[in-house]
Image (cartoon, coloured by chain):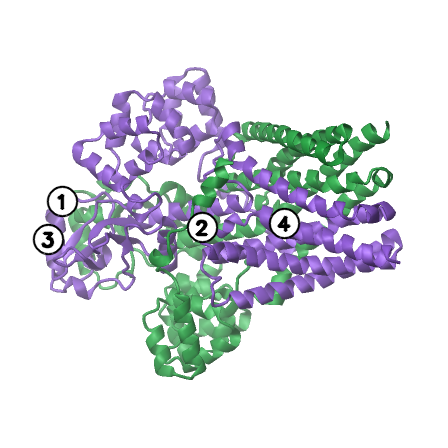
Chain colours: A green, B purple
Amino acid sequence: MAGQDEQLNERREPAEDEDYGLDPRTVEAILQAADAGDAAGIDALMEPLHPADIADLLEQIGAGERAKLLSHWSRGIDGDILSELDESIREEVIEALPHEVLSEAVRELDSDDVVDIVEDLEEPQQERILGALDDSERAAVKQSLTYPDRSAGRLMQREFVTAPEDWTVGAAIDFLRGEEELPDQFYHVILVDPRWHPVGYVTLGKLLSSRRAVRLKDITEDSFRTISVTEDEGEVAYAFNQYHLISAPVVDEHDRLVGVITIDDAMIVLDEEHEEDVLRLAGVAGESSISDGVVETCRRRTPWLAVNLLTAILASWVISLFSNSIQAIVALATLMPIVASQGGNAATQTLAVAVRGLATKDLTPSNAGRIVLRELMVGGLNGLIFALVMGATTVFWFGSPLLALVMAMAMIINLLAAALGGILIPLAIERLGFDPALASGAFVTTVTDVVGFFSFLGLATLILIGH
Amino acid sequence: MAGQDEQLNERREPAEDEDYGLDPRTVEAILQAADAGDAAGIDALMEPLHPADIADLLEQIGAGERAKLLSHWSRGIDGDILSELDESIREEVIEALPHEVLSEAVRELDSDDVVDIVEDLEEPQQERILGALDDSERAAVKQSLTYPDRSAGRLMQREFVTAPEDWTVGAAIDFLRGEEELPDQFYHVILVDPRWHPVGYVTLGKLLSSRRAVRLKDITEDSFRTISVTEDEGEVAYAFNQYHLISAPVVDEHDRLVGVITIDDAMIVLDEEHEEDVLRLAGVAGESSISDGVVETCRRRTPWLAVNLLTAILASWVISLFSNSIQAIVALATLMPIVASQGGNAATQTLAVAVRGLATKDLTPSNAGRIVLRELMVGGLNGLIFALVMGATTVFWFGSPLLALVMAMAMIINLLAAALGGILIPLAIERLGFDPALASGAFVTTVTDVVGFFSFLGLATLILIGH
């Protein structure tokens, strides 16, 4: 069991180095200050915190503590904190904000951050926020909201720097030095042709290190790729991760430049996509959050438990077909969950590898056949190993070589079924155009439960009862 | 079942937009050209591909196809492709490369990329690569290898741009314009004090848009944070994601600048950490890869299946305690897996949310108590729902109200146990200093299997057999 030893040895470094994120002692001190109504204490403790950490703090404490803290905190919610807040409590916080504070908070933000806040809100709150913006900003946000949910158009920012493709380094530097209003954060100058099509980009580092006479088009980056405004945000995150992009121009259906996506936004999307995969595989629906309440949590979990109940009833119906055999040999009831359980676990292993492979595009039509074959061989090998182990255990436990034979055969059959189910079900779901992570435990373990019980009890009836 | 309808409606966009990554038709055409020994065809098809896509191609095809393709491909492996390759086939590819090709490939790379390649190799291959470097580069790589595995020191690059903290914008621009050797990619100028401590950084955009007389220390970014060279890479990825960093200076134990980590490296780490979480939760050990062979795959999975077998035998021993009851009422054998299965699924849901919450530091000592309480309430509510459903089903199926009562009570008990196990086990594992994702299915479902079988069969023995 080398693999396991390895894992267990991977103890984390002592806490000393782990100095990012919120310190629980700080949280406790802040809650105590809030409880005591000590406004000066709250301000002193909150002052050094990053907006992302303040948002985490507000998410981690209870609703009552939150209200008390916010009422005593003099600085109050600003735009940065608002964009970091989880949507599960964002509505509650916005509701409590006085109109002028809310207006000031959203005016500070870039249009993509406002879109990110507005798209999750209910109608009346959307209107409140849109009303706080000035006309041009409101128009930009409304334009972004016309793009599909989770598209590049929602993700992009509209602040970027362009230069005509025939400019020289000198002209670009002079232009930048003379420009009054540049975006807060930009890393590239995008070259555009006269029809506003992006044709390449130059990093600011390359610009600064090149001679004035050099033409911009001669120092563009190889990594240049444009993104369609309707592209799914998951694909955008994939492209950034696969091609190590730092920023990428977004184009409309006529290939005209409309915005820019930067890697920090892509990283957030990648993180959200992963969260969705982990939760879906475990049978949790939608954008679950640690700060969801009981009802919301049930809404995300109970439906999949209902699906699982149906599949469990199916498996138990299979068992009921063999009631007479179980009555004759009660050891069958004792042993049958072992076959089902090993199958379920092996299938979950294969499923996780398959879903991950599909997400990273490492499992493709080109190698699917080879991977299915590998999984079958792994299933067969594990089947043999655990057939031997459980065969021996069964002889030792129940003293019946024939029962051991039944156990061994059923184990091999079910681990082969687990291998096939674990890989073919996510492949089929992907082919149908759905997210393969929806092939959560429920579907795949139905196969291993049904095959496990049927093969074990069926073989027992044939071999043991037939005798 | 609103949650589910939502999920099933989330059909992906049609394939039209999905234009990143390898096209399976391209892969097929390349394989055909390789099969026909058509070197010109291979070159034409491979020419437009990004090194990351070429690496994926090599990973997806079989070993025989790989050898044939590489023997006919005139351009051949370069440093960029080598760093993109998965370690599972990197050794094979390096082994096959002629010495001069390998030397040229590694000489092109930055020191952090060479470290990334060398750290995974066996001794003789390490020597081959180190031998291909020139002296200063070899010293830099060897220095990086003295830092712990998976530390910031392994991840950082040694190419960066600094300026004294008292410089003006004009001085910095003149310096950059005059410098011969600047890094390929850089986004910030790091300000250092005379003792080489980083004290802030200025983005190139801010530099270009500021007047020459402005002092650099007056236009530094608020987001400035330094990273310790021994910091765990997972913490580094967390800091980049939490604080939206683009790059961060790395300092040694005396707080002196030794390197820089950029967001693209942090994004790769974030992706790897997620992969590890998904696979560990499913009981797959270590850095599993889609291109692993059968033996390697078994090595990563069989140990956890062995652990699961032990827990399954424990559960079946619990069943064996009630053999007489099952002999008396064989319906118990039919119904008992339903209780265990619902518990296992509910526990997996809670576990996934808990592991994710710990990874994102959203589940902390400050709110653990509240979350445990929420999980208990969700477990109780689901227990009530499925107790009613299965109670009714049992009456309908077996016509026994008392059996239905046993089923309902066992369901509530097991869903409460699932809630507690699903949250307390990962919290305990984290507290002990291990990765909570190690609380894979095996541990948690042991609880729900044992509690499920014991409560159902125990209550049946008390209530039904006692009668």
In front of the other: label 4 or label 2?
A: 4
Image check: B84 left or right of A92?
Answer: left
Kind of element beneath mark 2? helix
Numbered badge on residue B174: 3
Residue type at tag 1: Arg
Query: Which of A357 and B301 lies nearest the eye of the viewer?
Result: B301
Read off the residue under disc 2: A270
Kind of element beneath mark 4? helix
Q: Are marks 3 and 2 in contact (CB under 8 Å)?
A: no
Kind of element beneath mark 1? loop
Image check: B443 left or right of B259?
Answer: right
Q: Are marks 3 and 4 in contact (CB under 8 Å)?
A: no
Kindly identify the residue that appears in the image at 31 percent across and 34 percent down.
B118
Residue type at tag 4: Thr
Mark 4–mark 1 distance (CA, rounded to whole Å): 66 Å
Q: From the top left corner, tell me how far across and down residue B328 is, in percent.
A: 87, 48
Residue type at tag 3: Asp
Query: Which of A454 and A420 lies nearest the eye of the viewer?
Result: A454
Q: Are marks 4 and 1 in contact (CB under 8 Å)?
A: no
In front of the other: label 3 or label 4?
A: 4
In front of the other: label 3 or label 2?
A: 2
Read off the residue under disc 1: A211
Kindly identify the residue that appears in the image at 36 percent across and 60 percent down.
A20
Mark 3–mark 4 distance (CA, rounded to whole Å): 65 Å
The answer as to whether the residues below labels 3 and 1 share one chain is no
Protein chain holding label 4: B
- Disc 1 crowd rating (10 Å Cα; few below 14, some 14-19, many 20+) is some
In front of the other: label 3 or label 1?
A: 3
Mark 1–mark 2 distance (CA, rounded to whole Å): 38 Å
Numbered badge on residue B445: 4
Q: From the top left corner, tell me how far across and down residue A63 is, in percent.
A: 52, 74
The answer as to whether the residues below labels 4 and 2 share one chain is no
